[in-house]
Image: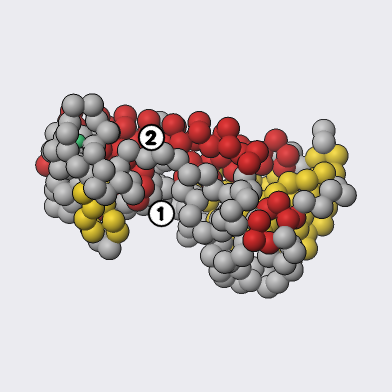
Amino acid sequence: MPELPEVETVRRGLAPYIEGALFERVTLNRSDLRFPFPDGFVSGLEGQRITHLGRRAKYLVATLSGGGVWLSHLGMTGAFLVADQGVNEASRLNPGDSSGKHVHVVANLIHPARGRVRLSYSDPRRFGFMDLFAPGAANPFTDPLGPEPLGNDLSAPYLAGRLKARKGPIKTVLLDQRVIAGLGNIYVCEALHMSRIDPRRAAGTLTEREIERLVAAIRQVLEAAIAAGGSTLKDFAKADGQPGYFQHSFAVYGHEGDPCPRPGCGGTIERIVQAGRSTFFCPVCQR
Ligand code: ZN
């Protein structure tokens, strides 16, 4: 499942090919992904130029020249591929999709510098989706989100304000997308370990200093993952039949029973379940 760093890596990989490009023709090979494509999806894209490819939480958000917004979510197995026209590399998109039968969307674009670019979207499990919003229209996916974890709006004073009086465990509160956008289970576990905070602590009991450590840790774990992703982008499709989302090395996530990697700690990583999600943490150094 692509998390924020993977989506950001995809955005950075795609942007040089599609930012500034004009949708010449869009072909849908089926009427739905996780949700049906909206009415007017194809006609709303064709003739539009992508002025900016952004990301909000785990959504790719493309701003169009007419002011509309094209939104994509990769779900669990969604992947984009760009190719120069005439190079059929659909099979590289998902190794389980050598036939290309899971390529659901194909867009022919004209890029001012690169010429013709073909953008394909493949998604064997179809948990991904796309939507299109008219200029200025409310966006039910991105409007309710809290600040981006890597943006300037996430600060220790902001987070302190949101945690104050919250009695739920800090782990669960950090997964609330209205508090911080796009922070998934893996990176919450990692950031809490890095900042030495027990995931079971009531959110409202964190001190100012702990919140400062936590905000710094959130940025650090995400930036490290994005940096690792950049170098693996070219290997996006792996040979093992799994979609090509890269596997990072994590300090605690997936490490139940392993020694805590913090030097001198000596603790053992435990797994508990909080709000239906696995939490990995070290009960010795996380307080
Ligand atoms: Zn430890």
Residue 135 position in % (x across, y down): 62, 53
Residues under labels 1 and 2: Cα distance?
24 Å
Residue at 23% across, 26% down: 263
Placement of 274 over or under 255, stated as above or below? below
- Out of 103 and 284, give the one closest to the viewer: 284
Q: Is residue 35 left or right of residue 108?
A: left
Please tell me how crowded label 1 is: few (under 14), some (14-19), or many (20+) other residues with Cα within 10 Å.
few
Residue 214 position in % (x across, y down): 26, 34
Residue 36 is at least partly visible in this image: yes
- Res 43 label: none
Image depth: mark 1 or mark 2 in front: 2
Q: Quadrant of residue 31?
A: bottom right
Residue 244 position in % (x across, y down): 58, 49
Residue 257 position in % (x across, y down): 24, 47
Amino acid type, callout 1? Pro
- Out of 277 and 139, give the one closest to the viewer: 277
**Where is ligand 1, by quadrant?**
top left
- Label 2 residue SS: helix
Please tell me how crowded label 2 is: few (under 14), some (14-19), or many (20+) other residues with Cα within 10 Å.
some
The number of discs equals 2
Residue at 75% across, 64% down: 99
Pointer 2 residue? 221
Q: Is residue 154 left or right of residue 227?
A: left
Quarter occupied by the C terminus? top left
Pointer 1 residue? 144
* Contact check, label 1 and label 2, Cβ < 8 Å: no
**Chain-order first, disc 1 or disc 2:** 1
Q: Quadrant of residue 39?
A: bottom right
Q: Is residue 102 left or right of residue 249?
A: right
Residue at 45% across, 53% down: 143
